Amino acid sequence: MAVKTVVNMDGMQKLLEKIRDSLAAKLLTKENFSVVVSSETTDCTTIFSPAIHLDPQRRYEMALVNLETYNSIPNITVANNTFVYSHNGGSLWKKITLPEGSYEISQINAAIRRQLEVNGDWNADDKSHYITVGANPSTLRAFIYISNSSYHVDLSSSAIKSILGFTPKHLLSAITKVKTR
């Protein structure tokens, strides 16, 4: 048996106002707050202020709704901030040290290029660089492109390999690889 309720417009307006007031009262009694967590490791512990008082007889759940880091977690530290390369076929090796911070791959490339320019290891005539660090967004992999056959990159002693996802190896230029085939 179906029950049909007929409410006129005035009755509907009063009903909606009652629901609105009830919801507003419930929402106003709840506290909204943000939790700021800071840590130098991946394990985070925080103390809530004001403290959260929970009834031990009830069961509670908590969820992370949003995480915004704004490049605030350093991925370059003293443990992985070196890039080792040679400009003369491996006879002399140079080390670039990046400052600690939060880098995207394009920023790692820019920092390495700045140091290559300071060291004179670039083509100043056409403003091109012999070593390029980049990423392929389709494969989510980093790459290192070496355009001059006398340049080498030593990832066995470069700590930055862990950030870029490389295993320890000695990289030669693409030109050298083509010539040796």
Image: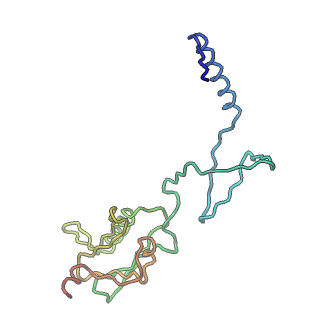
Q: Along the line of sight, which residue is nearer the eye, 92 or 78?
A: 78
Is residue 5 rendered to the left or right of residue 175? right
**x then y, percent, for residue 101:** 49, 63
**x then y, percent, for residue 148:** 23, 78
Which residue of the protein is positioned furthest toward the front in this rendering?
Answer: 1
The residue lying at 23 percent from left, 66 percent from top is: 127
69 shown above or below 122: above
| On-image quarter of the C terminus | bottom left
**x then y, percent, for residue 39:** 62, 61
163 shown above or below 44: below
115 shown above or below 51: below
Name which quarter of the figure residue 107 lies in.
Answer: bottom left
Is residue 157 rendered to the left or right of residue 48? left
The residue lying at 42 percent from left, 73 percent from top is: 165
**x then y, percent, for residue 152:** 31, 82
- Number of on-image labels: 0
The residue lying at 66 percent from left, 32 percent from top is: 27
Q: How is the image coloured?
A: rainbow
Name which quarter of the figure residue 42 lies in.
Answer: bottom right
The residue lying at 68 percent from left, 56 percent from top is: 46
Is residue 67 rendered to the left or right of residue 133? right
Name which quarter of the figure residue 133 lies in.
Answer: bottom left
| On-image quarter of the N terminus | top right
Q: Along the line of sight, which residue is nearer the eye, 115 or 134?
A: 134
